[in-house]
Each structure stands twice: as structure tokens, then as C-alpha cells.
Image: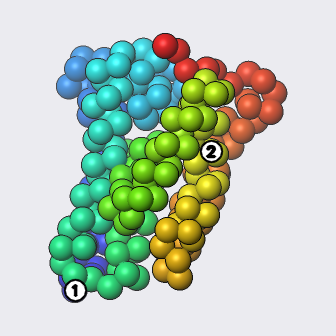
Amino acid sequence: MLDISLVVFAYLLGSLSAAIITCKLMGLPDPRSEGSRNPGATNVLRYGGKKAAAITLFGDMLKGLLPVLLARIAGVDDSVLAATAMAAFLGHLYPLYFGFHGGKGVATAMGVFLGISWPVAVALLLTWVVMAKVFKISSLSALIAAVLAPLYMWLLEPGSIFISLSIAIALLLLWRHRGNIQRLMSGTEGKIKA
């Protein structure tokens, strides 16, 4: 019963949209109707500013991290921990409260990885930062980090079920970024503004 409760809680928490809630509380337009129409930190940054984007980023990471930490405290086995992590991530992508239309999942995935393996999370963050410095494109930086996530997990958590988890998350991130990939290929993807 505990296992099921953790997974359900993770999905319900993941379903909360930090972007939508933050914009509503700060009197900003709904992110689903502005910019890229994606309820995520990058889109909020475009029209809401750095403060709103930072709050969104923190909120989305937290909802990925908290359920995993709770599952760790509960002492569940790795399979339940992985299921809890995936439930939080899927909650962000397909939120119950917002018609199953969520964000792309980068920040929530980072929170999940932080709870699963902080060395992997650090490696992913460093990858994003370096790629963002080089290419100045948020989506490309996120996609490169996503593709490398299974490799980092394999190197830093060898033989664990979390390798499969990281592959599943990477594939979903690629799928959610398919529009960005098309724009990257056509050279029309927006760059990070200073």
C-alpha cells in the first residue's frame, strides 16, 4: 500500500504546474497563452523576467525531488524508487489538473535525478551550463544533457535500475522537444537572452 501511495503522491505533486501557479500569483499572463505556450521556466523567462523564471525552475525541480526523497526516507526498494521518480516526471508532462497538457520536463527531470543520484545531477547540470555557454540555446543544451543522462547513470550508478529510468526519461524529453528539434534543424530555434 505504501508503494502505491508514494507513486500516486508523486504523480499528483508532479501535476502541479510551477509555471502556471507562479504566473497567476505574480499577475503574469498564463504561460500556455504566451511565447512558446509551454508552461516551463524558459518560456516564463521570455515574458515574465528572471524572478518568475527562477521560481518556476525551483518549483518544477522541487516536485521531482521531494517524492524521491520521501520514497528514500520510507526505505522502499530501487524499483519503487524508480517508479516514484517516473510518476513525478509523468505528472509534469501529463498533469491531471491541466487537461494532461504539461511542460517539457527538463527541470522536473533534474529534480528527479538529484534525488536518485546527486553526482549524476551535477554532471547533467554542468553539461547544460557548458552547452548553454557554447551554443546559447536552452533546448539544445537540455537535449544534449538528456542524451548523456543514461551514460552518466551507467558510469556513476552501474548495474542499477536507474539506468533504465534515465533512458525512459531521455526518450520522453526528446519526444517532448520534437518541435525544438525541428527548429534546431531549420536554424530557427531561439537563443538564450542575457
Residue at horizontal 28 percent and vertical 41 percent from the top: 59
Residue at horizontal 24 percent and vertical 65 percent from the top: 69
Mark with earlier residue (2, 1): 1
Q: Give how far apart the Cα atoms at labels 2 and 1 are.
A: 36 Å
Structural crowding at the residue carrying mark 1, measured as other residues with C-alpha within 10 Å and reported as few (<14), some (14–19) or many (≥20): few
- Hey, what amino acid is under mark 1? Met
Residue 51 against residue 80 in the figure, above or below: above
Q: Is residue 35 left or right of residue 23?
A: right
Residue 72 against residue 185 in the figure, above or below: below
Where does residue 144 sit, x and y in percent of width and height?
Answer: 64, 45
Element at label 1: loop
Of residues 164 and 157, the one drawn nearer to the viewer in this rendering: 157
Where does residue 50 sit, x and y in percent of width and height?
Answer: 35, 19
Q: Which residue is mark 2?
A: 143
Q: Which residue is mark 1?
A: 1
Of residues 154 and 5, the one drawn nearer to the viewer in this rendering: 154
Tell which tag, 2 or 1, sits nearer the viewer. Answer: 2
Residue at horizontal 56 percent and vertical 35 percent from the top: 130
Where does residue 26 sit, x and y in percent of width and height?
Answer: 22, 20
Is residue 11 in view? no
Count how many numbered circles sit on residues in the image. 2
